[in-house]
Amino acid sequence: MSKFDTLRKEHPVFVFRSYDINESENQAEVSFSFSIPGFAEFRPGWTFPKPNNIVVSGDPVFERLAFSLGMAEAVSYWKAVCSPEFLVECGSLNDDQKEWWKKLWFLGLGEFFYINGIEISQQELVNIVCTETAEDVCVTYNHELKGCLVPIGGGKDSALTLETLKNAGMDCRCYAINKRQSISATVNAAGLRQDELITAQRKFDRSLINLNNAGCLNGHTPFSSVVAFSAEITAYLHGLKYIVLSNESSANESTVAGSNVNHQYSKSFEFECDFHQYEKKYLGTGIEYFSFLRPLTEFQIAKMFVFHRKYLPVFRSCNLGSKVSPDIWCGECPKCLFVSLILSPFLNMDELKEIFGRDMLNDLAMVSYFTELTGQSVHKPFECVGSVDEVNLAVSLSIKRLLEEKRELPLLFAEYAERGLYHPEKLDELSKSFCGYFNERNLLPEKFKTILIKEMERLL
């Protein structure tokens, strides 16, 4: 019997026991209680800043938002044993909502299943049971909404979104979870005040780490869904109309070719549409949730981003580097390599080394990651990286420029050319095609679409 089957048999029920809301004059605190009966208890929580005149006690919309955030958080703890029953003791869900959550968990845990060798269907994965009878949700908009909330992670994508909207005259506030230095630096570089950054504090229950170390299941979860629900709470508290994400079209590509395993599932357009519909039917805030960069690829974003050179010294996208203070580029992971590659057609080698603090393109340790990123292996790296096609385009354009300049190719590029992967004959046509790409499968309101198209025409 596999570890997955053994743990499910030993721990047949996971319980979402309660969520509690406490507020002070300028804060709303939400705490959760999860349980694997007879085995583990979890107490994660959140603290959200709020205006002094906003009262959440007794607000049914805020109650729905808090409960939904708990459902999104719960999967991180549930996955330790993957109990076949998920018992909700503190809220109600109708059948449609239950299916919505089951889909999110199933597809959002695709990488987790793949890495752990788990094969199971969506319907077999978990049965969601509620002790309360589900009632129809009365969708009500409690107050006037205006302005944008732009989640900032410190990377190039959110910086480009913020810069473009700000320059277009849009009223923007920024959102962060557990603020890091690169986030503050991005806000400063955008010319905004630090008090225009709203930071929610997330308290993770670290007892889960002890269970992982003791042999429970571990792996990637759909964290961007947690970002979505927490941003929804933040926008609601501050009366903001739009949650403007920075997920691109490339996030739709599967990490494992020919499968539904996508490291970025909760950044995909499929999840964006699902969340948009869930908000309208079951949350009732009146807030619009969409990704400003959804029509674009990572290649286009990189080309547009480098025009705003003030962000080059401060942006960070490295997950490993974010765990130290101040956050850094580790220079040793596939995410660092990807960002270096996608920027390489638009910056010279010295500029890349200055940004990342090392020469990854001449590093033998990067060969396996490079192979994955260029589509020469079974799967891409399990990171938020662009599509195989645009990585190959970026690499080929960089090689072409270096050859024209009669400069020596770095190790990774030389190996790429030696393997016959460099084909310069159609590069100009391919680059033009990529730069003119616009994915019409998006949820951009018309005024945001107009802003993006104008910026594309200016920079691409």
Image (spheres, rainbow, N blue to C red):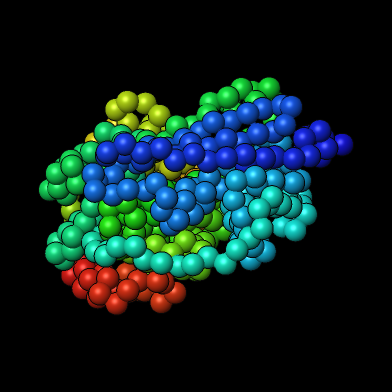
Total marks shown come to: 0
Q: What residue lies at 62% left-to-right and 49% top-to-bottom? A: 109
Residue 407 picture location, percent across and down: 28, 47
Say which of 255 and 354 sits in front.
Answer: 255
Work out which quarter of the rendered image holds the C terminus and state it. Answer: bottom left
Q: Residue 163 is drawn in which quadrant?
A: bottom left
- Left or right position of 381 against 311: right
Residue 188 picture location, percent across and down: 16, 42
Say which of 170 and 87 sits in front.
Answer: 87
212 to 427, vertically: above or below = above
Work out which quarter of the rendered image holds the N terminus and state it. Answer: top right
Q: What residue lies at 18% left-to-right and 63% top-to-bottom? A: 170
Residue 249 picture location, percent across and down: 43, 64
- Left or right position of 273 against 161: right
Say which of 282 and 317 sits in front.
Answer: 282
Residue 241 visible at all: yes
449 to 81, vertically: above or below = below
Residue 228 visible at all: no
212 to 126, vertically: above or below = above
Furthest residue in direction front, as rendered = 58
Residue 161 picture location, percent across and down: 27, 58
Q: What residue lies at 32% left-to-right and 51% top-to-bottom? A: 237
Q: What residue lies at 41% left-to-right and 53% top-to-bottom? A: 59
Furthest residue in direction right, as rendered = 1
